[in-house]
Image (cartoon, grey):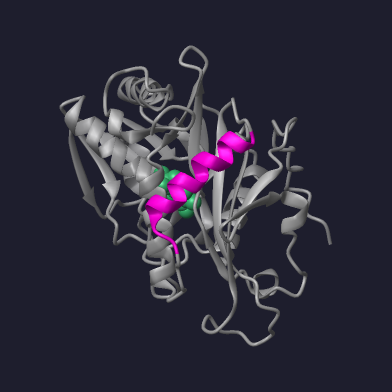
């Protein structure tokens, strides 16, 4: 039986006009065709792997590509491995260097997304995490367009709950666990909005499909605490710093009730892919005035300038690809 209440899913815009053919595989730089994975690899059946995602932003005036906190992303990859007891034979610093070489080899001179993955590639059937061959891959791709509209995101609270830490480590980026946000995102898009907000099993606000969430109530910004089954986002940490250090605001990390989404003064989503995006509607109700919040716009502007290394603020957050790191 087909449902008539569901609208077709619009295609996601793609900017993949160009591809970066060189990939990093276990210490070597190879053509991506040479890095193919067997259909029998463990990860193909069971989603057994971990990954991360790093943003690199091209500054035309500087003729430089800037990685945003690459070390923090590789340290999180290492923690993801630790949480699953997977072997991790590299230092995060080594992987930052490998990424710089990878981007130079691909002559990346545009906004770029870097995707490191540690995959269980052993061709074995048993379901387990231990004693299975792994492979560490890093590839780069032109930054994909159209994650969420930066002019204002309309959300639904998903009928799917965020996978809890009692089921698998939520602060690790586990390949297979992304079926959960993928279901929520598709449900939201089929219902005609942009994005999903997932609640915890207890019904508190956790996060969006691939972004953390902040709400402002009066002079206080509020974001779900790290014990609310969120991914501990690096952009989330940057925003806490910007709100407190630059806007002179207050941030409280705590349990967030669903109804606070409906009555807050402004709200935003943040993550490596979405960067900062204003939340303008939740469950068909306007957030605040229904327009992007003033402070959200200021945070978008500040972070945008920081990642192009234009503002002079937090220079330690960016790493050059072409010049001396
Ligand atoms: N939550 C989830 C589930 C994510 O996949 C992401 C993207 N990595 C985020 C939050 C935001 O994290 P970050 O700011 O580190 O990209």
Q: For the magenta stretch, what is the residue range?
A: 90-106
| Whether residue 200 can be seen here | no
Quadrant in which residue 276 is drawn = top left
Q: Which residue is depicted at the point 50% across and 33% down?
A: 56
Q: Look at the picture and state if 203 lies above or below 299.
A: below
* Residue 11 occupies quadrant: top right
Residue 174 lies left or right of residue 166; in this view the side is right
Q: Position of residue 177 (x, y in %)?
A: 54, 65
Give the quarter of the image for residue 84: bottom left
Residue 21 at x, y = what percent? 71, 42
Residue shown at 38%/61% (left/top)? 203
- Residue 198 position, x and y percent, is 46, 54
Residue 108 within the segment the image draws in magenta? no
Q: Which residue is at the front of the view, 283 or 67?
A: 67
Would residue 227 be seen by someone viewing this image from the given angle? yes
From the image, which quarter does the N terminus lie in?
A: bottom right
Q: Is residue 315 left or right of residue 300?
A: left
Nearest the viewer among 251 and 301 is 301
Q: Nearer the viewer, residue 211 or 95?
A: 95
Identity of the residue drawn at 27% across and 29% down: 314
Q: In which quadrant will I find the C terminus? A: top left
Report whether 324 appears left or right of 145.
left
Is 96 magenta? The answer is yes
């Amino acid at each position: 039986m087909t449902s008539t209440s569901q609208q077709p899913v619009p295609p996601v815009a793609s900017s993949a006009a160009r591809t970066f053919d060189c990939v990093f595989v276990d210490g070597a730089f190879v053509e991506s065709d040479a890095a193919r994975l067997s259909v029998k690899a463990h990860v193909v059946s069971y989603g057994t792997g971990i990954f991360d995602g790093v943003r690199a932003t091209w500054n035309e005036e500087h003729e430089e590509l800037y990685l945003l906190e690459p070390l923090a992303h590789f340290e999180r990859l290492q923690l993801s491995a630790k949480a699953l007891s997977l072997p991790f034979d590299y230092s995060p610093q080594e992987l930052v260097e490998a990424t710089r070489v990878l981007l130079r080899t691909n002559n990346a001179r545009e906004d770029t997304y870097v995707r490191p993955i540690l995959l269980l590639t052993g061709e074995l059937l048993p379901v387990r995490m231990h004693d299975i061959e792994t492979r560490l891959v890093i590839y780069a791709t032109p930054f994909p367009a159209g994650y969420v509209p930066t002019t204002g995101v309309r959300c639904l609270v998903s009928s799917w709950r965020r996978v809890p830490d009692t089921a698998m480590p939520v602060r690790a980026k586990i390949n297979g666990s992304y079926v959960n946000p993928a279901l929520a995102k598709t449900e939201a898009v089929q219902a005609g909005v942009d994005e999903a907000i997932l609640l915890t099993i207890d019904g508190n606000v956790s996060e969006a499909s691939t972004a953390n969430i902040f709400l402002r109530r009066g002079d206080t910004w509020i974001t779900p605490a790290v014990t609310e089954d969120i991914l501990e986002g690096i952009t989330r940490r940057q925003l806490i710093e910007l709100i407190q250090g630059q806007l002179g605001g207050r941030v409280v990390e705590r349990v967030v009730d669903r109804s606070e989404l409906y009555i807050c003064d402004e709200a935003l989503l943040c993550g490596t892919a979405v960067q900062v995006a204003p939340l303008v509607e939740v469950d068909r109700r306007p957030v605040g005035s229904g327009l992007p919040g003033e402070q959200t716009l200021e945070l978008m502007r500040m972070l945008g300038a920081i990642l192009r290394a234009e503002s002079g603020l937090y220079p330690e957050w960016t790493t050059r690809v072409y010049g001396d790191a």
